[in-house]
Image (spheres, rainbow, N blue to C red):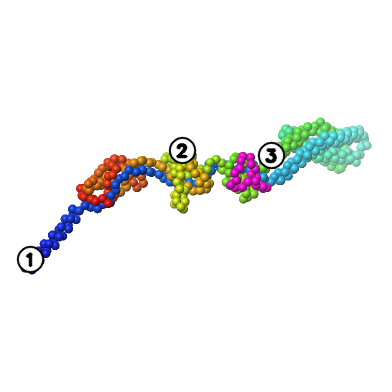
Amino acid sequence: MKRAVKIILLVIVLGGIGYVAYVQMTAPLNVNAISIVPEEARLSFTETGIVEYEDQVFVYPPVAGKVLSIAVEEGQTITKGDLICQIDMSDTAFAIGEANAQIASFEAQIRNLETEQVRNRDSLNIQKNNLLKELDTLNVQENSATVTQEEQMEMQNKILEQNLADIARLENEFNTVTQILYDSGELPRVEYDAAKTAIDNVKAQYEQNLQQMEIIKAGTAQTDPAYYNASREALNEQIRGIENSLSKDYTAAMKDSYNAQIQSVRVNIERLNDSVLDSEVYSTVDGTIINLPVSKSNLASNASPLAEIAVGRSLIAVYVSTNDIDSVSIGKDVDLILRRREGDQTYKGKVVEIDDKAEIKISSLGVEERKVKVYVEPAEHKELFLIGYDVDVEFLVFSKRNALLLPKTAIFNDDGTDIVWEVKDGVLQKTPIIKGMEIHSEVIIDGGLAAGSVIISDASLEELSEGINVVAQ
């Protein structure tokens, strides 16, 4: 009896276990699913830009120097022709005074030329007359039988003195006239070389006459006709040298030289006067001063700008990667996002300018990128976009209305065909689809599904198989 009861109980337990197993095997599978709803698909990228002026003009000083006064300040709106600053030109005024003194000196030298020439001619004529007298004395000595050694020494000393006077005259003429005219281009090389040769000849003649003096000192009076001929030739040579100097007139050439130097100085004075006029620096454009370096240094340099003036519209400058620049065009609408603590504010904008070259930029991660500068103008509430503000600019690459979107995780590939797990009437089936553009983590479905289709969101689950009953969650 007991044994029969045990068998009955065992059958009941086993039957219960089998029933539970049957129920579990035939119960529908609970899965996470998506009911496709048509919506707008958008592909975009966002870059951060800075509000700045459309263009900047740098104002450089035409002259350098210490700044006496500054007439503007940063942030000030100015118009073309407004005074920016004034530069101290006291050093230039001093230079102008020195230049005028040079002109006065040259003009005085011109006035003295004729007076000096008359004085020199009178002196030369006196020397010539004295030499003629010495020549007569020499002739008398030659015809006299009683000439003494002392008389010949006296005559030779006069010849030597005249030699020295000739050397001094020719060297002075060379240094004060010939060299100046040659350096200024007024005298040809031939005449310059001839003047040097004349000095060398007189010096050589002086040496010969010194030797003759030694001969006279060593002996008695010279009676040889050769002595008188040599002395006579020495006197005549000195007379010819004086006559040659009397025949020259450097007055006109020297005047031309001085006048040329005067003209050069006057040109310099004009340049200095222009720089004095340039000491007042004015704005060249209408705009707003956004940087005023001169207010910090108080020095003006031709190599550094005094002021930076912003002109034109206030625009948002944003750098776009060369990978995305093909999606940007002039006139294209963008969204401008102002980040605020109380919530982001989005406004409309429009692309107005695109640079024709890329620049190298370093990302926050230290990666080198090539980006193109794009200018965007706010289309509304321009007063909110102030100079220096950061603005996020969203560029739309692609959009489609009433698109069917699925996460990439819902799609798998089966023998080259894109498949999804679709739930129809509670039963799971494989449905081929046609994929369109990928939008971040989602894919647009271009064919194979309709609005309202229920699709398993994760196609990688192992328990999924075609034909099983499922309950979509």
Residue furthest bottom as drawn: 2
Image quadrant assignment for residue 162: top right
Which residue is disc 3 drawn over?
Answer: 274
Span colored in magenta:
64-85
Three-letter code, disc 3: Asp
Three-letter code, disc 2: Ile
Q: Residues within 10 Å of mark 1 (few under 14, many from 20)?
A: few
Horizontal arrangement in the rendering, residue 206 relative to residue 384 (left or right):
right
Question: Which mark identifies residue 330?
Answer: 2
Horizontal arrangement in the rendering, residue 400 relative to residue 240 (left or right):
left
- On the image, the x and y values in percent for residue 260 come to 73, 35
Depth-wise, is mark 3 or mark 1 nearer the camera? 1
- Does 141 sit above or below residue 465? above
Q: Residues within 10 Å of mark 2 (few under 14, many from 20)?
A: few
Q: Is residue 313 visible?
A: yes
- Does 11 sit above or below residue 340? below
Instruction: Find numbered disc 2 in the image and state the secondary structure of the residue it sits on.
Output: loop
Q: Where, quadrant-wise, is the N terminus in this rendering?
A: bottom left
Residues at circles 3 and 2 in contact by the CB criterion of under 8 Å? no
Q: Residues within 10 Å of mark 3 (few under 14, many from 20)?
A: few
Three-letter code, disc 1: Ala
Instruction: Find numbered disc 1 in the image and state the secondary structure of the residue it sits on.
Output: helix
- What residue is shown at x 9% (from left), y 66% (from top)? 5
Residues at circles 3 and 1 in contact by the CB criterion of under 8 Å? no
Residue 191 painted magenta:
no
Which residue is disc 1 drawn over?
Answer: 4
Separation of residues labelled 3 and 2 (CA atoms): 46 Å
Residue furthest left as drawn: 1
Residue furthest right as drawn: 146
